[in-house]
Every structure is written in structure tokens, then in C-alpha cells.
Image (tube, grey):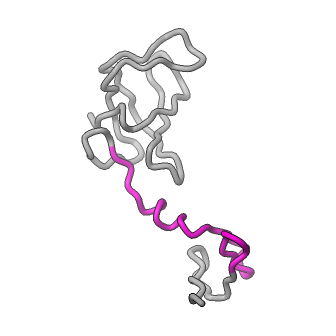
């Protein structure tokens, strides 16, 4: 039997497995086996550059936007991006014409 991991939130070792989740009864935090690997994964653009919150990115190809008749053209600048928690493949941001975009990082490059 494997040794239960320490809680990533409070650091105590009083944890137990419940199905596929680990539970800490002291602070109530629940996490899965693969959560730790994804949290440490950096968000990268199409060229492999690491993105961080507040960066400016450029769209590398024309994209259709669901719910809008205006496409995002190649070269559109997205300023002050926000990273999506637990998802290294998506970012959130706003263009000049379209607000509230969620974009895949494979269509972006760091400006």
C-alpha cells in the first residue's frame, strides 16, 4: 500500500483516499492524483514561449468566434491576458472589438 501524500493546501499528513480523490479532513481540501502535475505545467504559446498573466499575445491565424459575426484576424493583439486555472491550453482575454474571449494557446504567439 502506498503512503498517503501530504495535503498540498495545509501540509498536514492526515489524508485518506476516497475513490479517485485524496481528502484532508483537517482543512477539507480534495484533490486528484493528476492535479499536481497539471498545476506545475507552464502555459506555452505556439512557439513554446512561457506565457504569464498580463502578457500580450498575437493571433497567428484567422479564427471564427462563436456567438459573434466578427472573426479574429491574423495579427490581432490580445493585451493583458489571464491564465485559466488548471488548463495550460487556454487563456482568457479581450480584443478591441470582442470582449470575454477564451482562446487556445496553439493559435497565439507572445508579442
Q: Is residue 31 magenta?
A: yes
- Residue 83 versus residue 103: which sits nearer the camera? 103
In the figure, residue 42 lies in which quadrant?
A: bottom left
- Most extreme residue toward the top is 69
Residue 70 higher or lower than 85, as above or below: above
Residue 13 location in percent, x, y?
Answer: 61, 88
Residue 7 higher or lower than 104, as above or below: below
Q: From which residue to which does the magenta span run?
A: 17-44
Screen quadrant of the C terminus: top left
- Residue 79 versus residue 5: which sits nearer the camera? 5
Q: How many callouts does the rendering have? A: 0
Residue plotted at (67% across, 70% down) = 21
Residue plotted at (49% across, 10% down) = 70
Screen quadrant of the N terminus: bottom right
Residue plotted at (53% across, 24% down) = 99
Residue 6 location in percent, x, y?
Answer: 57, 83
Residue 57 location in percent, x, y?
Answer: 33, 33
- Residue 64 versus residue 79: which sits nearer the camera? 64
- Most extreme residue toward the front is 1
Residue plotted at (38% across, 49% down) = 43
Residue 17 higher or lower than 101, as above or below: below
In the figure, residue 32 lies in which quadrant?
A: bottom right
- Residue 55 versus residue 101: which sits nearer the camera? 101
Q: Is residue 73 magenta?
A: no
Amino acid at each position: 500500500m502506498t503512503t498517503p501524500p501530504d495535503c498540498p493546501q495545509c501540509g498536514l499528513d492526515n489524508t485518506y483516499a476516497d475513490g479517485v480523490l485524496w481528502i484532508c479532513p483537517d482543512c477539507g481540501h480534495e484533490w486528484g492524483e493528476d492535479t499536481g502535475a497539471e498545476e506545475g505545467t507552464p502555459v506555452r504559446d505556439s512557439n513554446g514561449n512561457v506565457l504569464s498573466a498580463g502578457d500580450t499575445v498575437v493571433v497567428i491565424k484567422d479564427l471564427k468566434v462563436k456567438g459573434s459575426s466578427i472573426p479574429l484576424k491574423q495579427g490581432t493583439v490580445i493585451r493583458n491576458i489571464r491564465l485559466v486555472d488548471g488548463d495550460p491550453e487556454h487563456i482568457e482575454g479581450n480584443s478591441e472589438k470582442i470582449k470575454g474571449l477564451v482562446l487556445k494557446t496553439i493559435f497565439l504567439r507572445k508579442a
